Image (spheres, rainbow, N blue to C red):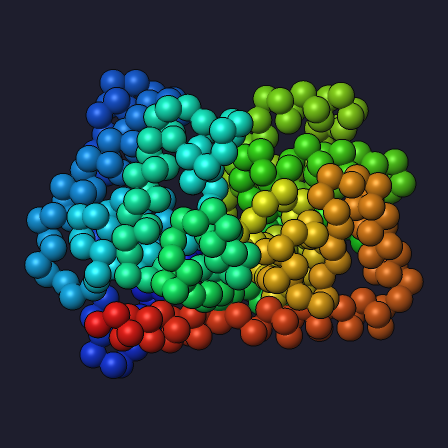
Amino acid sequence: MDLASDMLFKELAAQRDGLIPSRIRPRFVRRFTRFGPTSAKHLFNADRLLNRFLDYPRYLRQRIGEFDLFHVVDHTYAHLVSVAGGKRCVVTCHDIDAFRAALEANCDRGSWLMAKMARRIIDGLRGAAAVSCDSAATRDDLVRYRLAPDERLSVNPNGVAEVFTHRTDPCADAAARRLLGAPKRDRFEIVNVGSTIPRKRIDVLLRLFAALRREMAGARLIRVGGALTPSQRQLMRELDLPADSIVETPFVPREVLAAIYRHAAIAVLPSQYEGFGFPALEAQACGTPVVLSDIAALREIGGPAATFCSVADVQQWTEAILTLAQERRENARQRRERVEAGIRWAARFTWKDHAQRVVQLYQSIC
């Protein structure tokens, strides 16, 4: 959640109410990755584990006396609350994914180590003076699983960075063209942004894209984020999806991401679970219609201009996208109204408003 942290810090630093924000980020210590390839995921995860649960608390103890209040802006670090003192701690909770190992017996993350870490994070969350939730859906999840007292919870939606706009940016647009190639009038392109973890349902994305190509042979999928996993690549082969029908890019600067949204005809987010769903708002802010999973958080965040489909219902997703493709070809007025409605909806979510609500939360604690 670097985006949320960066934008909140920027807005707090611009406030003129006597509040002086500081970042507390200890240097990342490499232990295992010093003796092996830094790309080895298990070595990096081991380093990250020790940095998170050993080095970070140790570093924080040395600086306790420097601050009046602490804000843990990523709930996966909520164990730091026990170090800083809960009565002067705020935690932002983005979703409950990190807690599932301790909540669900059949969770695929349910190893004893993951469950132990999850319980430690939960203990910290419960000890915080206040918990700010990105969405009402996340707050409801916390209440349902009794992860934090209801009276300490509040809902404070994230904002949309100003860089996500329907207005052209020549430099960013040129960078996007280098990644994607020049846009073609007769080529229909959809974009999906995010990681490839199971809850993002990349399997559904690939299946609906395969169904879409049977109706629109020139369709192309733009994937921004982590590389497809071996099992996802195997599914590509099983679906006979040509390698050049899918363009994979790494995580890119926000300006370039905005240009990629503008480049695409539609953005899709087929997740099984989300705590917020930044792409739903970012794409609409850039003038790109969205098709989203019909789940609580995306219903809340997506707004009236979005199209919603049942999770994993490939036929419904395909029909929805084909309908929007037809609208784009044959009904310019309706398409324009959809785009403008999405832009207006996304404009309701600003980081300035987010920061002002956070300051009110700080004041209520202090």
Looking at the image, the residue that sits furthest to the top is 35
Q: Residue 282: percent from the left, percent from the top?
A: 58, 60
Q: How many marks?
A: 0
Asked if residue 289 is positioned above or below residue 176 in the image, the reply reads below
Examine the rendering and report whether any part of residue 113 can be seen.
yes
Horizontally, is 211 left or right of 190 in the view?
right
Q: Residue 204: percent from the left, percent from the top?
A: 71, 36
Horizontally, is 96 left or right of 271 in the view?
left
Which quadrant: the C terminus?
bottom left
> In this orientation, which residue lies closer to the viewer: 111 or 304?
111
> In this orientation, which residue lies closer to the viewer: 346 or 335?
346
> In this orientation, which residue lies closer to the viewer: 338 or 299?
299
Q: Residue 355: percent from the left, percent from the top?
A: 38, 71
Asked if residue 139 is positioned above or below residue 312 in the image, the reply reads below
Asked if residue 97 is positioned above or below residue 256 in the image, the reply reads above
Horizontally, is 116 left or right of 83 in the view?
right
Horizontally, is 209 left or right of 174 in the view?
right
Which residue is pictured at 76% across the width and 68% down the height?
Answer: 338
> In this orientation, which residue lies closer to the viewer: 207 or 62?
62
Which residue is pictured at 79% across the width and 39% down the height?
Answer: 314
Which residue is pictured at 26% across the width and 81% down the height?
Answer: 16
Which residue is pictured at 46% across the width and 52% down the height?
Answer: 142
Q: Residue 100: percent from the left, percent from the top?
A: 47, 37
Examine the rendering and report whether any part of residue 179 can be seen.
no
* Location of residue 130 by image quarter: bottom left
